[in-house]
């Protein structure tokens, strides 16, 4: 019910302030009331998705079910690389640095063994180091904060890995057709890459690098693919190529 929200033409700052207060009042009104487990944290028209650790649920608003994430006219390989990786990403959040601390009922609980946690920290530290060394094209003098972005980077790596496995399961041992000169595996990774296309100003990029837990799209694509042996095999990536990473340097969380 937005009847109490006042929007005035020509008053941008005032509108933003009133919207902020309206949203705050809405959240405060929930205090002391039963939790509405059917409430979504995103609107249907939001092109995004999320994992909710307290509910142990993944949510996909209607708006994300369109190109480049999902296309009814595209073949399975492209869609698994697109929306499949997004689904895998959100599942991965249940086992990242934050989500892994909640059990299946949404309780804050350590359900891992000390050995599991130690190995997890070892692998994620390698991923943090990788991203710390990266600087985007738009702001080459500013590096990614690997610690800030580790949760989303884990999600990206898990997402691509899970989606690729799901695609292979869907093939049921059959050979994927070659379309436009590309094999099924190649189209899968092209579908994944298309999701991260974008354009951003240098100033906006610097703000994101300082505040956004997501890495720049450039690295959500390229750095993830560098860590996947399946990508190297699909395109015959070899030492000296821009997206080559030595097997011993590649990180696999799960």
Image (cartoon, rainbow, N blue to C red):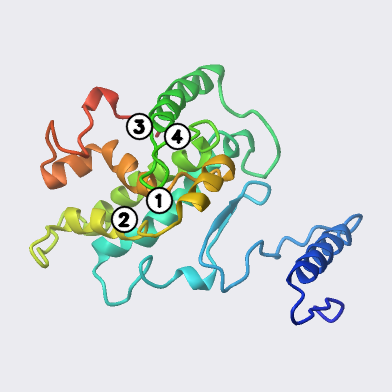
Q: Which residue is mark 2?
A: 192
Nearest to viewer (mark 1 / mark 3): 1
Image coords of residue 249 (percent x, y): 28, 25
3 or 2: tag closer to the N-terminus: 2
**Mark 3 vs mark 2, CA separation in Å:** 18 Å
**Mark 2 vs mark 4, CA separation in Å:** 24 Å
Question: Quick check: 250 above or below 154?
Answer: above
Q: Looking at the rendered structure, which numbered label has been put on residue 217?
A: 1
Q: Which residue is mark 3?
A: 252
Image coords of residue 209 (percent x, y): 52, 42
Q: Residue at x 77, y 62 (%)?
A: 36
**Mark 1 vs mark 3, CA separation in Å:** 20 Å
**Mark 1 vs mark 2, CA separation in Å:** 11 Å
Image coords of residue 22 (percent x, y): 83, 67
Q: Residue at x 31, y 60 (%)?
A: 194
Label 2 close to label 4 by CB (< 8 Å): no
Please tell me in which quadrant of the rendered image residue 35 appears.
bottom right
Please indicate whether residue 208 sits to the left or right of residue 231 in the image.
Answer: right
1 or 2: tag closer to the N-terminus: 2
**Mark 4 vs mark 3, CA separation in Å:** 23 Å
2 or 4: tag closer to the N-terminus: 4
């Amino acid at each position: 019910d937005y009847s109490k929200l006042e929007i005035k033409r020509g008053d941008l700052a005032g509108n933003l302030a009133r919207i902020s207060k309206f949203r705050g009042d809405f959240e405060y009104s929930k205090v002391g009331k039963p939790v509405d487990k059917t409430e979504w944290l995103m609107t249907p028209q939001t092109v995004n998705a999320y994992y909710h650790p307290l509910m142990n649920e993944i949510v996909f608003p209607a708006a994300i079910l369109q190109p480049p994430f999902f296309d009814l006219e595209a073949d399975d390989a492209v869609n698994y690389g697109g929306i499949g990786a997004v689904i895998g990403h959100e599942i991965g959040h249940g086992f990242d640095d934050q989500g892994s601390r909640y059990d299946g009922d949404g309780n804050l609980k350590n359900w891992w063994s000390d050995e599991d946690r130690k190995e997890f920290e070892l692998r994620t530290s390698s991923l943090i180091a990788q991203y710390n060394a990266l600087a985007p094209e738009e702001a080459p003098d500013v590096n990614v904060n690997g610690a800030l972005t580790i949760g989303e980077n884990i999600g990206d790596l898990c997402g691509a890995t899970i989606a690729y496995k799901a695609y292979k399961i869907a093939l049921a041992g059959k050979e994927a057709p070659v379309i436009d000169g590309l094999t099924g595996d190649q189209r899968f990774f092209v579908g994944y890459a298309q999701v991260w296309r974008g354009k951003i100003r240098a100033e906006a990029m610097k703000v994101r690098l300082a505040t956004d837990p997501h890495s720049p799209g450039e690295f959500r694509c390229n750095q993830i693919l560098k860590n996947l042996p399946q990508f190297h095999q699909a395109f015959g990536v070899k030492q000296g190529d821009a997206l080559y990473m030595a097997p011993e340097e590649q990180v696999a969380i799960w």
